[in-house]
Image (cartoon, helix red, strand yellow):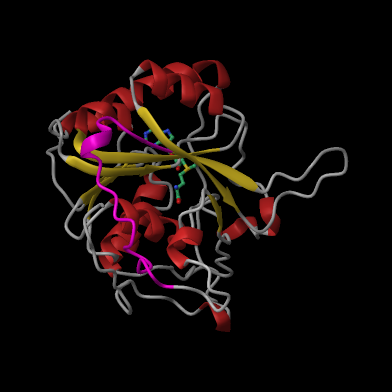
Amino acid sequence: MEKQFELNKVYNLDCIEGMKIIPSKTIDLVITDPPFGIDFKAKRENYNRKSSRVLDGYNEIRGKEYLKFTYDWMQEVKRVLKDSGSMYIFSGWNYLKDILNALDELNFITINHLIWKYQFGLVTSRKYVTSHYHCLYVCLVDRERKFFPYSRFDKNAKDKKGSSLHYKDKEDVWVINREYWNGDIKTPTKLPAEIIKKILAYSSEKGDVVLDPFLGSGQVAVVSKMEERKYIGFEIVKEYHDFINERLEKNLYRIKDEEVGYVQKETELLTLFDKPTKYKHKQKV
Ligand SMILES: C[S@@+](CC[C@H](N)C(=O)[O-])C[C@H]1O[C@@H](n2cnc3c(N)ncnc32)[C@H](O)[C@@H]1O
């Protein structure tokens, strides 16, 4: 592989091979959402979206290969993560056991098992509706781990009822809506910007290097850029990789679908740098 290590770059590579270009202990934070390990059809009309605007592709991993695949990519993350770093891994429940087993095998320390509760799931008639995702917050050296407990709310800030705002924000169930991108080009699954901003605020500082081995639509790289972090990442599907590069190069949060030639009024194109989120950082207490 001839690729050179560069920050603020996304690579169209298999991340297990691609991460080998990253020098050891250079990454401050990993935020990632690996493939689901289920027969996920990227082009199907899921979640009521018009499939014509959903980019084709999506590289899936077969169930029986999931544990080895997970172990292999995590082993590279273990090598490149700084002692002060941490990783957030999103997962549905199907292959959660493989992710947990690989983390144990590689001696990652679990800090929290977070739940992301989103606003809708697929309608069911013979079982309950899945409307949450797991997010494992892990690290390698706990005493070195960066965490900024009052980066979003001051220690003494209270809501109208007198309850502590930072306490509420740090509870381990996060209720955050998925984003609808009506009329814009999209990939079939993506993390909302709000969830990435929250993780960046608690677990990184401006200028830190954020890695996502499985970029998809590139949300982690795009939001890291918005929040003045450095980024690096991998996406194996070329069409997705081109889409991410276009977003980053044009500093656009959403991209209008030229073929459809239409953007709904309420979904104006958003640029990345209108309002960078202002957080102050105080070191851990
Ligand atoms: C669940 S999606 C990530 C979605 C992303 N978090 C977002 O917000 O758009 C997983 C992505 O990993 C990609 N992928 C699968 N295997 C890969 C590999 N070995 N290396 C790099 N990317 C891979 C898939 O094509 C897919 O786009």
Figure label count? 0
Using the rendered image of the protein, determine whether residue 11 is visible from the camera's viewpoint: no
Q: Quadrant of ligand 1?
A: top left
Image coords of residue 3 (percent x, y)? 15, 36
* Residue 141, quarter of the rendered image: top left
In the displayed structure, 194 sits above or below 267; it is above
> Seen from this angle, which residue lies furthest right?
125
- 151 inside magenta stretch: yes
Taking depth in this image into account, of 34 and 203 the one nearest to the observer is: 203
Q: Furthest-bottom residue in view?
A: 265
Give the extent of the magenta segment: 137-157
Q: Is residue 231 visible?
A: yes
Front residue of 117/191: it is 117
Residue 112: horizontal and vertical position, in percent?
45, 39
Magenta span dominant secondary structure: loop
71 relative position to 36: left or right: left
Q: Is residue 49 left or right of residue 101?
A: right
Residue 263 location (% of width, % of height): 54, 77
Does 183 sit left or right of 278 as displayed?
A: right
Q: Let me know if residue 21 is in the magenta part.
A: no
Q: Quadrant of the N terminus?
A: top left
Say which of 34 and 239 sits in front. Answer: 34
Q: Is 7 rendered above or below residue 134? A: below
Q: Nearer the viewer, residue 246 or 165?
A: 165
Q: Position of residue 128 (x, y in %)?
A: 79, 42
Residue at the image point whose x is 29% and y is 73% from the top? 278
Residue shown at 32% from the left, 59% from the top: 201
Q: Is residue 184 left or right of residue 147?
A: right
